[in-house]
Amino acid sequence: MYIALESLFGGGVNKLPVDCEFDFSKEELDGVFPFTTPVSVKGEIKNVVGVVTIEADITFSLEVFCDRCAEPVKLDFDIPMVHGLVSSLNEDDNDDYILIEDMKLDLLQLTLEDTFLALPSKFLCKEDCKGVCTKCGANLNNDSCNCKKDIDPRMEALLGLLED
Ligand SMILES: [Zn+2]
Ligand SMILES: [Zn+2]
């Protein structure tokens, strides 16, 4: 998905709307394919006195598994996409700018990069997810299990003596 930027860099227009949807259903993340709905990119590319920027919102949902309790969870994301775009690099420019080659912006590639950079390293069904019991596997968000709290092995030996 390329957006032609000749008119914008040339000053023929000073604004181009961005309104795209991408299918990321074949994008793998930790062994699963969580992008079950299209990824939407909405915003605009504008030229303000020769400075070209893209400002858009990337919105999508992910169907993943909670890293603590392993329950399936659907999470909504809204990620800002803000970049300066340049048609040639000057010495003053740095990594904040994206070099546009042949006056074409590869919006799909940029969306992929921004999306994956913004994803958290862990997904939680809720901030205070209690996870699962390491002994019986009960989901502690729903059940309280009857497992004893982990006992210090030295204490366990003492308790064993007492029982004898
Ligand atoms: Zn959870
Ligand atoms: Zn338990």
Image (cartoon, rainbow, N blue to C red):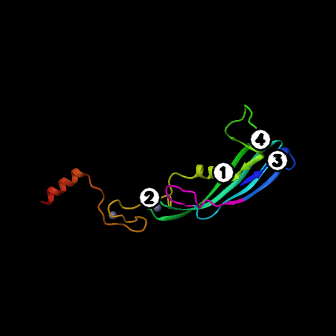
Q: Which amino acid does label 4 sit on?
A: Ser
Question: Magenta residues?
Answer: 20-34
> Which badge, 2 or 1, comes first in the chain's sequence?
2
- State yes or no: discs 2 and 1 in contact (Cβ < 8 Å): no
Q: Is residue 65 above or below residue 92?
A: below
State yes or no: Cβ of the residue under disc 2 lies below 8 Å from any atom of ligand 1: yes
Local secondary structure at mark 3: helix
Q: Residue furthest left?
A: 164
Local secondary structure at mark 4: loop
Q: In this view, does 98 lie above or below 17?
A: above
Please state which of residues 40 and 139 is positioned toward the viewer in this rendering: 40
The residue at 82%/41% (across/down) is 50
Disc 3 versus disc 2: distance between alpha carbons?
49 Å
Q: Mark 1 points at which residue?
A: 109
Query: Percent from the top left, x then y, of residue 68?
Result: 44, 58
Q: Is residue 14 left or right of residue 146?
A: right
Q: In this view, does 61 lie above or below 82?
A: below
Q: Which amino acid does label 2 sit on?
A: Arg
Disc 1 versus disc 4: distance between alpha carbons?
17 Å
- State yes or no: discs 1 and 4 in contact (Cβ < 8 Å): no
Q: Mark 2 points at which residue?
A: 68
Q: Mark 4 points at which residue?
A: 87
The residue at 31%/66% (across/down) is 146
Q: In which quarter of the image is the N terminus?
A: bottom right
Mark 3 is surrounded, within 10 Å at the Cα level, by few (under 14), some (14 to 19) or many (20 or more) other residues, namely some
The residue at 21%/50% (across/down) is 154
Disc 2 versus disc 4: distance between alpha carbons?
46 Å
Q: Residue 145 carries which label?
A: none
Q: Name the residue under label 3.
A: 6
Ligand 2's image quarter is: bottom left
